[in-house]
Amino acid sequence: MKTKVTLLLILFFQVSLAIVPKNTTHSGWEIHTLNTAAEAGYLSPLEKEIILEINKLRSDPARYAEDFIAPLAKKYVRRLLYYPGDQPLLTKEGVNALYECVRDLKRQQPLPIIYPSEGLTLAARDHVKDQSKTGRTGHQGSDRSTMRERVERYGTWEKRIAENIAYGGKTAQQIVIYLLIDDGVRDRGHRKNFLNPDFRMVGVATGSHTEYGLMSVMDFAGGFKTTEK
């Protein structure tokens, strides 16, 4: 009997200006503090959960690795990851990518938490709506728009912007963990985006995808000023 295997596709894109690192820390997982999207009525429950998950990660990377990522090492059988509650995922690197991720997160100092942006969410939502219809993947829209062009439809960004896209996954935590492990992505760009101290705002959009079931787009910025309507 053959095992049904799921493939997960994750993509990232980044645009940078001058970088001015800041060593702001935030310790502990105080949900009322980390749940910065709780009152954002333009976000779905899953989208709010993704932002909360990112803030849990940023507030205590080492604890996040220890509690949620390291235990998954026991769920690998060669290159198959049996993530609880989902179909087996065929990885490219096997458990080694997870071990590397855990090492990185345990060395990472706490980071500033991020806050939701309606303008960035609209940019992310445009891409989700587009690919939900076309079934395409990647950062380019069917209208040939780039991530930067979509973001700039809705306002002005500061310092730098980046985009993470995940195709697949079932829960906010699973989506964030897969992007953090970044299996098969040589420069671990998704992980770097999550752990970039310059990012203070994010827009998140989720929706259906014809091939992968669920897709999630996260647009990050150092700051964002929405254009007045």
Image (spheres, helix red, strand yellow):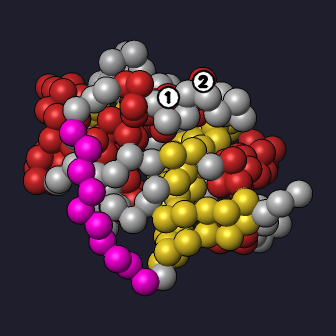
Tell me the quadrant of the picture where the C terminus can be found: bottom right
Give percent across and percent down for residue 110. Answer: 22, 49
1 with respect to 224 (left or right): left
Q: Is 185 drawn above or below residue 135 in the view shown?
A: below
Q: Is the residue marked by circle 2 packed among few (<14), some (14-19), or many (20+) residues within 10 Å?
A: few
31 with respect to 93 (left or right): right
Residue 182 is at least partly visible in this image: no
Give percent across and percent down for residue 169. Answer: 48, 32
Give the residue at mark 1: 49
Q: Which residues are magenta?
A: 18-27
Q: Is 199 drawn above or below residue 65 in the view shown?
A: below
Residue 207 is at least partly visible in this image: yes
Magenta stretch holds residue 24: yes
Q: CA distance from mark 2 to mark 1?
A: 6 Å
Tell me the quadrant of the picture where the N terminus can be found: top left
71 with respect to 213 (left or right): left
Give percent across and percent down for residue 141. Answer: 74, 62
Q: Is 228 drawn above or below residue 121 in the view shown?
A: below
Disc 1 marks which amino acid?
Glu
Give the residue at mark 2: 45
